[in-house]
Image: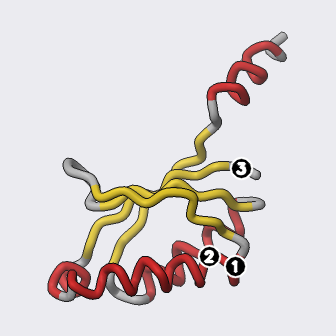
Amino acid sequence: MPTFIIMLNWTDQGIRNIKDAPKRAAAARELGKKVGVEIKQLFLTTGDSDLLAIVEAADGANLAKFCMAAGATGNVRTKTIRAWPEAEYMKLISELP
């Protein structure tokens, strides 16, 4: 399944209610199951993003549903990128004309 990286930032509401973050993470995992997204890893980060999630999804449509539903909670804003593991991108390179 394709891998995606979701960069998340807490909204004012999300940081104000930070103690609820463990429950929100569990709810996000359940939401993911419903829309075909598996959260593989979740990281607290410094810098431009507050959190980073490594997820797998069948396609971008599943991921879009997940990010819209997560954003609709009002606790986070998301940015997403597609990621290819080293073995996959080496294969892509080997197939170049």
> Does 47 sit left or right of 35 as displayed?
left
> Does 56 sit left or right of 18 as displayed?
right
- Residue 49 sits above or below residue 69 on the image: above
Residue at label 1?
35
x, y percent for residue 51 = 33, 60
- Residue 54 sits above or below residue 16 on the image: above
Q: CA distance from mark 3 to mark 2?
A: 14 Å
Contact (CB < 8 A) between labels 3 and 2? no
Tell which of 26 and 88 is nearer to you: 26
> Does 4 sit left or right of 73 as displayed?
right
Amino acid type for the residue under numbered disc 2? Gly
- Residue 33 sits above or below residue 37 on the image: below
Quadrant of the image occupied by residue 93? top right
Amino acid type for the residue under numbered disc 3? Pro
Which residue occupies 70% across, 26% down?
Answer: 87
- Closer to the chain start, of discs 3 and 2, is 3
Q: Under tag 3, what secondary structure?
A: loop
Q: CA distance from mark 2 to mark 1?
A: 5 Å
Residue at label 3?
2
Q: CA distance from mark 1 to mark 3?
A: 15 Å
Count of all numbered marks drawn on residues in the image: 3
Which residue occupies 26% across, 61% down?
Answer: 50
x, y percent for residue 15 = 19, 79
Around disc 3, counting alpha carbons within 10 Å, would you say few (fewer than 14), some (14 to 19), or many (20 or more)? few
Quadrant of the image occupied by residue 55? bottom right
Amino acid type for the residue under numbered disc 1? Val
Contact (CB < 8 A) between labels 2 and 1? yes
Residue at label 2?
32
- Closer to the chain start, of discs 1 and 3, is 3
